[in-house]
Image (cartoon, rainbow, N blue to C red):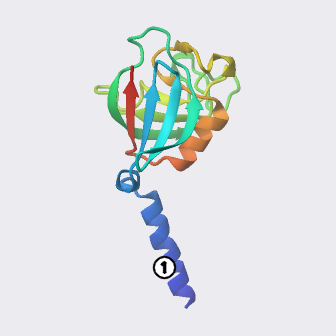
Amino acid sequence: MRWFACFLALTLSILVYSPSYAQEEGVYIVIDKSLNKLTVILNEVPVYDFPVATGKSEAATPIGEFEIIRKVKNPWYIPKNIPGGDPSNPIGTRWLGIDVPGTNGYKYGIHGTNDPSSIGRYASQGCIRMRNRDVEWLFRHIPLRTKVRIIP
């Protein structure tokens, strides 16, 4: 009986954390640049809203439909050689890279910040910036391959 409980728990965990789970369950993200808002949608119903910062210029943050293809905990900020977990790291505590063509999920992403006062403004180089606590929630609950729709 104990082996059956373990088998059931393992099977359920595989289903829950399967990359295709989000698509099957109708989970996706909408980022509205005009409102600087990220919304998590479940079965066509908005279930969570988060304030974000988007690109300083209108063209900086790409528009279109993408997928989350990278998830990194305590990402390294390569341009200034700032290690992950360092309080001065401008991309904060989590990185969810999106598949903008030609970037492999490393140039554009949804990430945290070391400057929470920038949230709600047009302040980034093109990424979607969130408060660290908000992006940590997203990192835990949104699987790889989740669709991300960025609208003007």
Q: Which residue corresponds to the image point at 42% horizontal and 29% vertical from the top-left?
A: 106
**Position above or below: 84 against 21:** above
| Residue 73 can be seen, yes or no | no
Q: Which residue is farthest right? A: 87
Q: Position of residue 112 (x, y in %)?
A: 59, 29
Q: Quadrant of the C terminus?
A: top left
Q: Quadrant of residue 62?
A: top left
Q: Residue at x 50, y 85 (%)?
A: 4
Q: How many marks?
A: 1
Residue sitting at the far left: 101
Q: Determine whether, in the image, residue 93 is placed left or right of residue 105.
A: right
Compared across the picture, whether 127 is left or right of 149 comes to right
Percent position (x, y) of residue 149? Answer: 37, 32
- The percent position of residue 49, horizontal first and vertical second, equals 56, 36
Mark 1 is on which residue type?
Phe
Above-or-below relation of 107 to 71: above
- Circle 1 sits on which residue? 7
